[in-house]
Image: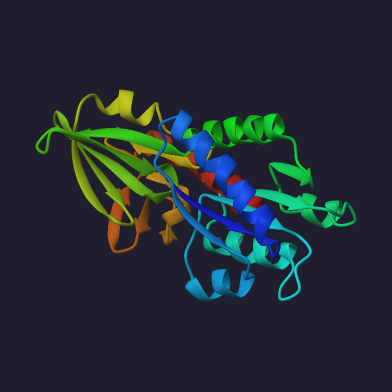
Amino acid sequence: MKIVICDDDKVNLNQVKLHIEEYMKEHYIDADFFSTTSPKKILDCGEAFDIAFLDIQMPEIDGITLARELKKRNRKTILFFVTAFGDYQDDAMNLNIFRFFVKPFNIERLYSGLDKAIAYLDQSYIDIYLEEESRYIKLPVDSIKYIRRENRRNAVFTVNGNYNVSGDFHELIDRLPNTFFYLVHKSFYVNLHYITEYNYKELHIDSVRIAIATRKQADFHKHWFEYVKSC
């Protein structure tokens, strides 16, 4: 898990980091921290983060502007704002923040906010077992392009590589959200975000052509256009 903390007040920066580190240790969560008093360093590094703790009023770049950039890199980044001022709450709410802390912040409230953030992140990932390598890996749900059933195995195609996974196909796909995944064929579960071409009878994900089962074509057609309208 990657966590970024930015506050132009170094004392407050170190205090926030200390409490978050303690929380992560207590919950046995591995976390990499990027903490700085300079928002420009965060913009220049180009990294994406899972959780961000940002001061709002800073001399170089304000926290709202920084948060918008972080959301572009990873729309699931969880935002916490820490500030001595309440004037920016309306702007902050437009970014779907998790919590707004006014300095000095309450430790119990911080931990409660982290509990909710971790629960949210857990729902954004899926654990899959790679039988050939005898290990589990955690995949971001959003990174999965499609899953193809291959007899008693499943091929999971993602933006970062492909994986062969043993187990029941339907048990696997039942763990994924049906809001942007769709079973277009008894052997294909596709992520609508990655469809590059669609023509009623088939769809393309990059250069891969996937046929839509005849009995599913009408329903998928409606589902697809509802999805497009919501984008």
The quarter holding residue 163 reads top left
Q: How is the image coloured?
A: rainbow
Q: Nearer the viewer, residue 187 or 167?
A: 167
Q: Residue at x 52, y 36 (%)?
A: 22
Image height check: is 9 above or below 188? below
Residue that lies at the very extreme toward the right in this rendered image: 87
Q: Position of residue 35 (x, y in %)?
A: 54, 59
Image height check: is 116 above or below 11? above
Q: Residue at x 85, y 57 (%)?
A: 88
Q: Position of residue 48 (x, y in %)?
A: 49, 60
Q: Nearer the viewer, residue 34 or 88?
A: 34
Q: Residue at x 40, y 31 (%)?
A: 28
Q: From the viewer's perspective, tell me whether residue 147 is left or right of residue 24.
A: left
Any part of residue 201 in sight: no
Q: Quadrant of the image for the C terminus?
A: bottom right
Q: Nearer the viewer, residue 69 or 221?
A: 69
Q: Residue at x 72, y 41 (%)?
A: 99
Q: How many marks?
A: 0
Residue that lies at the very extreme toward the left in this rendered image: 132
Q: Position of residue 57 (x, y in %)?
A: 79, 64
Any part of residue 11 in sight: yes
Q: Position of residue 112 (x, y in %)?
A: 65, 29
Q: From the viewer's perspective, tell me whether residue 160 is left or right of residue 167.
A: right
Q: Nearer the viewer, residue 142 or 208?
A: 142
